[in-house]
Amino acid sequence: MNKKLEQKQQIKLAVDCIIFGFNNNRLELLLVHRGFEPEKGKWSLIGGFVGNDEDIDDAANRVLYDLSGLENIYMEQVRTFGKADRDSSGRVVSTTYSAMILKSEYNEERVGKYDAKWFPIEDLPELIFDHSEMVGSAIRRLRRRVRNFPIAFNLLPAKFTLPQLQMLYEGILSESLDKRNFRRKVSQMNYLVRLEEKDMSESRKGAYFYRFDEELYNKELNFNL
Amino acid sequence: MNKKLEQKQQIKLAVDCIIFGFNNNRLELLLVHRGFEPEKGKWSLIGGFVGNDEDIDDAANRVLYDLSGLENIYMEQVRTFGKADRDSSGRVVSTTYSAMILKSEYNEERVGKYDAKWFPIEDLPELIFDHSEMVGSAIRRLRRRVRNFPIAFNLLPAKFTLPQLQMLYEGILSESLDKRNFRRKVSQMNYLVRLEEKDMSESRKGAYFYRFDEELYNKELNFNL
DNA sequence: CCAAAAGTGTTACCAATACACCCATGG
DNA sequence: CCATGGGTGTATTGGTAACACTTTTGG
């Protein structure tokens, strides 16, 4: 690594969060309305600058907490965007994180303050800067990873039904899946535990609730849907 | 994004390059010997700070060029390391890039100036800071991607033989592959074109040279080994 | 003629796909 | 009793993995 900089480096480092939610049986993103120039009036990812003594992962968690009031949310780094002219307000390099939250659990009041709104991923508004590209990377990454890692459960409550889970996967992958094949795979995962209780709210017959057992999963570390 | 910083942000942004090569039938990394404190005497990835008006991708290419004299080298961003205490000399966030180069083509003189040396990935020296973790991510990423994208050809000369290609894959994946299964897959890829010429240097019988035809590949965009 | 590496096909198994009917219940 | 969504099994196909001998030629 070069010891000396020719001139003092003047680059600001930010994080931006791509926040996924599964609402009304659709995969959605939480975006904030930008109330200041440049690009005032457009929508954007929620972001913030990294503190001097703050891990960048912590910065992403803080930004998410400020917006939603939620802590200990599952987040993954996606990638870093660093074109010199990506932000028209100055030189800012931004590392993106994707997060998955439950609409039912966040703090409506905080979200309201930020003028934030959910948008289905199929129907996003115009975003500032390179945020559309960021969203694209995050969605592609999610689609890749969701088949091999049990991360999608972060978008469902602790107890969920198989019809719900299937709709979630269909929403994420944006394709329809065969019910019987889907359920066969699920039934091979011993860490997806069927409860005695049924969800009677969606049908007359009722659908069994399941839960994801992390302990059991950690013994196999093997997931495929 | 927050408009104002509570106090001026004092974070330096760097790039570090994980440079892969395939030498002596082994997958190797090019590392530089650190001649200054802290961590003097250990080995490290080659890195450098990002210029104020420089895309981070360009910074990675510049750093690689400074070391090797090579331009237009295939590079991919891996991920960004941003723990507050990762670099004991101050707050530095580093984005890592992986590159693949041919030992035969680089500029020995430049490399010598940097006190750089190749190490087989199975036998790396102690690295400074979190560079071992960076190397780990880059190798895992390479192993994942090499099966689905034709990127390994960057580690071979334009003309290569199938025994060479197979040894490369075995070196990258660190497992041995079945020759006939490997060759069946290769023969399904029409963009791997067999030349008339044979390489007589490795055997009496001689092995046909092949080349990777990028144009043809771009029509299929489908790769699997 | 032999050592050393290059080249070649078939079978067995597992995973993914396609597909249609019965079940339970509230109204 | 019927409309609605929940739940179940089988046959086919395609891809992956395992496996051993023949070919070429310089020395």
Image: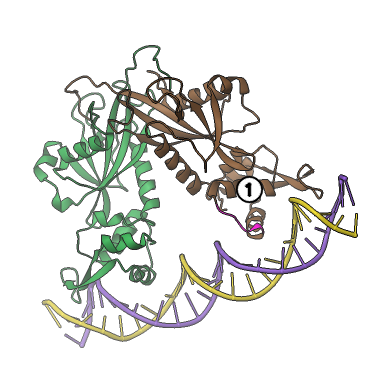
Chain colours: A green, B brown, C yellow, D purple
Q: Is residue A199 magenta?
A: no
Location of residue B225 in the rendering, given as x and y in whole percent from the top left corner: 57, 53
Instruction: Report x, y in % for residue B167.
Output: 63, 48
The N terminus of chain A, quarter of image: top left
Q: Nearer the viewer, residue C2 or B97?
A: C2
The residue depicted at 50 percent of the width and 27 percent of the height is: B32
Secondary structure under badge 1? helix
Left or right relative to A55: residue B33:
right
Q: Is residue D20 above or below residue A95?
A: below
Q: Is residue B80 left or right of residue A211?
A: right
What x and y, as percent, mark residue D18? 60, 67
- Specify the farthest residue to the top: A7
Rendered location of residue A124, percent (x, y): 29, 43
Nearest the viewer among B69 and B174 is: B174
Answer with the quarter of the image where residue B81 lies: top left
What amino acid is found at the position of numbered circle 1 in the picture? Met
Q: Quadrant of residue B94?
A: top left
Region rendered in magenta: B175-179
The answer to which quarter of the image holds residue A69 is top left
Circle 1 is placed at which residue position? B167
**Magenta region, main secondary structure:** loop
Which chain is indicated by disc 1? B
Query: Which residue appears at 56% of the width and 33% of the height?
Result: B118
